[in-house]
Amino acid sequence: MEAAHIAVIDIGSNSVRLVVYDRSGRAPIPRFNEKSLCRLGAGLAETGELQPEGFRRTVEALRRFRAISDAMEVVRTDVIATEAVRRAGNGARLVAAIREETGLEVRVLSGAEEAHFAALGVIAGFHEPAGLVGDMGGGSLEVAELTGGGGENSVSLPLGSLPVRALLAGGRREAKRRIDALLEEQLPQSFGRSAFYAVGGGWRALAQMHMAAKQAPVRVTHGYALDPAEVRDFAKSLARMPPSKLAAQPGVAARRLDTLPASALVLERVVKRLAPERVVFSALGVREGWLYAQLAPQTQALDPLLEGADAIGTPQARVPAFGAALVRWTEGLFAGESAAERRLRIAACVLSDVGWRDHASVKAAESFRRLLQFPLVGLDHGERVFLAATIHARYAGRPADPALSPAIRLLPEGARRRALILGRVMLLGYRVSGSVPEILANARLQVGADRVRLAIGAAARVPDSEVVADRLKLVADAFGVRRTEIVEAA
């Protein structure tokens, strides 16, 4: 895994974006993200050419992005281009101009490649996803089936926000008819229907508006999942709104106003056509898929949640090795622990020291709020709340703390109890050991029907501490057990 920064520049039909990542790996974290609305695809359908203004703005954006990359000491900058550049008669001239002005080489993706990398982006961002990926950009819509290789069964349709906006100029009814005809002709009936992963800025903007309108307890686009009927109803309402009413909606991004009706209409018709079981929004797409494709197979096979937790939590910990010690100490804590529960327990252990610099009075609440927003992938909103609630309990937060609401409502009672137990056991582990892995390895927690016992190895000595006793009492309370005991192990 590289330690140096890498960058990807994505030249789309509507915008050009630079993302600088901290490093290459299974869960690269963005360090810098900037977009320029160059409208490169404007007028392309009518003329077949990139218009001078969009051409000029794109070259200028690449010059700026190259300067930023150089200043950040990026070791590799990859440039990819999609629908507008591959369709335009003067697309090759733009590629040449970028090379001359910046020294950067542009890889123009085919429609199949764009679908492939969008599918890989979803594979990179979720834990074992299954279903379909739809990536709506400014110029086209790619729909791909999620397979091991990423999107081999795919189609590319001219249903980007710019051409659909042009269709809407002729009336919504006619636009809908033409979209439906294209979807019926091009989308294979063999496509799976378990889930539809929505990729692209327009669809992310729609998800953000839905979260704002419904006052969603977690305002993170990645992993936001909705019932298809709810998606269709909301998208229909947006597609029909007059511009003034649309602009007044909560959560609306002003830069998306002119293309939002087109994005909403396409999403509504695609979901109707495919009839998935659920719609999941993804913050990762072609750029992240491009990076994922360059990883070794053994790196691709890693869990993105655990890799991301390690990238964030381990460098912030006072004792980097203590997260792994907690993982070992909590093995066997939950009888019948599933694989999904185990990966969350491991991630929580690795993230368990993220709030140590905060004042004691705010550690629990601030850690909870922070973890709800951390740039973690490979988890849904409920799992995100579980991690946050666990670290809240690790910092002695009360189960009735108002800071937990409303997000805690995403967790069923069993998961809330498990988060409380795990957090309290972590809290005890830190106190008993002083964050020293060797001391923790000499401690054993035994939970019985009538008591919770802490056994400490003779080398570490039994702590004569009211604080340890108090922490053990919190563990017992979480288990619903009244008696506690601290003994020296043989």
Image (spheres, rainbow, N blue to C red):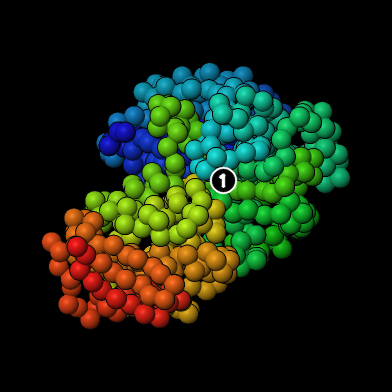
* Left or right of 246 in this view: 288: left
Q: Image quadrant of residue 33?
A: top left
Residue 36: percent from the left, percent from the top? 49, 42
- Residue at horizontal 44%, vertical 49%? 343
Counting every numbered tag in the picture gives: 1
Name the image quarter holding the C terminus: bottom left
Q: Nearer the viewer, residue 334 or 189?
A: 334
Q: Nearer the viewer, residue 246 or 30?
A: 30
* Left or right of 449 in this view: 224: right
Residue 275: percent from the left, percent from the top? 77, 43
Instruction: Give neighbour class at mark 1: few <14, some 14-19, many 20+ (Cα, 10 Å).
Output: many
Is there any visible trace of residue 294 in the rendered image?
A: yes
- Kind of element beneath mark 1: loop
Amino acid bearing label 1: Ser
Name the image quarter holding the N terminus: top left
Residue 477: percent from the left, percent from the top? 41, 77
Is there any visible trace of residue 396 in the rendered image?
A: no
Q: Which residue is mark 1?
A: 282
* Left or right of 307 in this view: 456: left
